[in-house]
């Protein structure tokens, strides 16, 4: 139970155009133009300003519910290029995972998750970058205007948009870790505009891990873009 909960907390901080498939399935509705959807989301969240993000720091509070147990705590995510720190503090357990650009370290022995920079919102600024592929959301998952963005390492996020604003209303990811498939979905309740960039401020997340389903509610207090971050904080030499 302890390890499962630790995985949930690590997953929680994961907020992620070159090719586009033209698949069609008989009897289905025409595919949404994934490229147009990706551009709409990119523009709505700041457009070219997204490409200026060098560092991103988000700190706030989180309430995690596993089965019937509610666990309040705080979280912080520090991103600088490909480097990152994920730090979560709760009344149950504290967790920290760091990537210094070469090596990943975790406070939990044997548990290392996909980079927080290649899933969810931090992936969005990479729209249009070489090796980052925009494609339609698979037929069986299509439910509203959206697109899939896949990073060079193969991790992907399915983004869904608000029809009126073009802002991301929710996103989903699924990936394999240690032979098991994990899925997570996020619904965004509120955004904050920082330096012309629209960043998720309050959101809820659902985790499906086989027999366990958990929920978490996040509320960012501090959101900093392009603040100076010394590489030493990542343990880089």
Image (cartoon, rainbow, N blue to C red):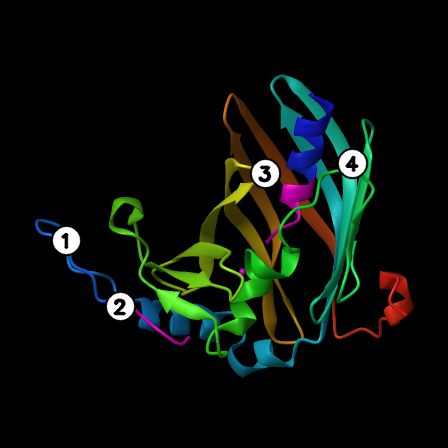
**Which mark is first along the chain, 4 or 2?**
2
The alpha-carbon separation of the residues under discs 1 and 3 comes to: 33 Å
How many C-alpha atoms fall within 10 Å of the one at disc 1: few (<14), some, or many (≥20)? few
Residue at image mark 1 = 25
**Which mark is first along the chain, 1 or 2?**
1
Q: Is residue 227 left or right of residue 22?
A: right
Q: Which mark is residue 73?
A: 4
**Which mark is first along the chain, 4 or 3?**
4
Image quadrant holding the C terminus, namely bottom right
Tell me where the magenta segment starts and ends, as one range: 10-20
Residue at image mark 2 = 33
The alpha-carbon separation of the residues under discs 2 and 1 comes to: 15 Å
The alpha-carbon separation of the residues under discs 2 and 4 comes to: 40 Å
Instruction: Name the residue: 44% across, 68% down.
Output: 41
- Residue 168: horizontal and vertical position, in percent? 46, 59
Badge 3 element:
loop
| Above/below status of 99 relative to 173 | below
**Which mark is first along the chain, 1 or 4?**
1
Instruction: Name the residue: 76% across, 46% down.
Output: 75
Residue at image mark 3 = 178
Corner quadrant of residue 33: bottom left
The alpha-carbon separation of the residues under discs 3 and 2 comes to: 34 Å
Relative depth, front residue between 221 and 171: 171
- Residue 88: horizontal and vertical position, in percent? 78, 42
| Above/below status of 87 relative to 43 | above
Q: Which is more foreground, mark 3 or mark 4?
A: 3
Relative depth, front residue between 183 and 54: 183
Q: Are marks 3 and 2 in contact (CB under 8 Å)?
A: no
């Amino acid at each position: 139970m302890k390890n499962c909960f630790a995985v949930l907390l690590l997953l929680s901080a994961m907020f992620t155009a070159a090719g586009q498939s033209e698949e069609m399935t008989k009897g289905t509705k025409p595919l949404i133009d994934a490229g147009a959807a990706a551009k709409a989301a990119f523009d709505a969240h700041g457009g070219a300003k997204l490409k200026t993000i060098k560092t991103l720091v988000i700190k706030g509070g989180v309430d995690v519910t596993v089965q019937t147990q509610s666990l309040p705590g705080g979280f912080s995510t520090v991103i600088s290029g490909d480097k990152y720190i994920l730090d979560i503090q709760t009344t149950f357990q504290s967790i920290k995972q760091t990537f210094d650009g070469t090596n990943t370290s975790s406070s939990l022995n044997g548990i290392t998750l996909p980079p927080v920079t290649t899933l969810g919102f931090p992936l969005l600024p990479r729209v249009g970058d070489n090796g980052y592929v925009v494609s339609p959301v698979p037929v069986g998952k299509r439910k509203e205007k959206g697109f899939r963005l896949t990073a060079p390492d193969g991790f992907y996020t399915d983004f869904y948009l608000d029809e009126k604003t073009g802002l991301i209303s929710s996103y989903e990811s699924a990936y394999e870790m240690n032979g098991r498939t994990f899925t997570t979905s996020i619904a965004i309740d509120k955004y904050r505009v920082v330096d012309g960039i629209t960043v998720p401020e309050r959101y809820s997340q659902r985790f499906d891990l086989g027999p366990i389903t958990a929920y978490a509610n996040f509320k960012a207090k501090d959101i900093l873009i392009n603040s100076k971050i010394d590489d030493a904080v990542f343990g880089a030499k």
